[in-house]
Amino acid sequence: MDCFLCKGNLQERKVNYVVDLENTIIIIKGVPAKVCTQCGEQYFDDETAENIEKIVNQLKQLATEVTIVSYKENVA
Ligand SMILES: [Zn+2]
């Protein structure tokens, strides 16, 4: 699989995923992703994307300004 944007090489890496919501910012650390070595675009597989969505849905109920969680600890 090549980068959709620039056709660069993708490399498996752990990234920090940042969700900027209206009243809170959620940072999920250590999310497995494929990252383009040329342009830095990040790709997540379906399972990971689903897990991210679940984590975000849980955390956005919290009234904190910034929430930082570890991906590993929040995926069963
Ligand atoms: Zn790219």
Image (cartoon, rainbow, N blue to C red):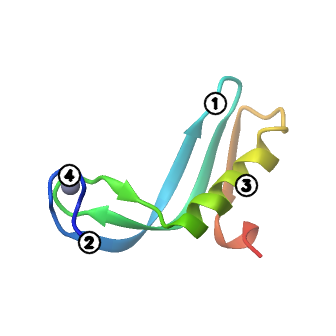
Q: Amino acid at mark 3?
A: Ile
Residue 29: x and y, percent?
A: 57, 60
- Pointer 1 residue: 21
Q: Which labelled disc corresponds to residue 39? A: 4
Q: Secondary structure at mark 1?
A: loop
- Among numbered discs 2 and 4, the one appearing first in the sequence: 2
Q: Is mark 4 within 8 Å of ligand 1?
A: yes
Marks 1 and 2, how far apart at CA? 31 Å
Using residue 31 as the reference point, say whether residue 71 is left or right of it.
Answer: right
- Among numbered discs 1 and 2, the one appearing first in the sequence: 2
Marks 2 and 3, how far apart at CA? 27 Å
Q: Which labelled disc corresponds to residue 44? A: none
Q: Residue at image x 83%, y 32%?
A: 63
- Pointer 2 residue: 1
- Among numbered discs 4 and 1, the one appearing first in the sequence: 1
Of circles 2 and 3, the one toward us is 2
Measured along the vertical axis of the image, is residue 72 above or below residue 25? below
Measured along the vertical axis of the image, is residue 53 above or below residue 74? above
- Pointer 3 residue: 55
Using residue 63 as the reference point, say whether residue 19 is left or right of it.
Answer: left
Q: Quadrant of residue 23?
A: top right
- Among numbered discs 2 and 3, the one appearing first in the sequence: 2
Q: Are marks 2 and 3 in contact (CB under 8 Å)?
A: no
Q: Amino acid at mark 4?
A: Cys
Q: Secondary structure at mark 3?
A: helix
Quadrant where the image shows the C terminus: bottom right
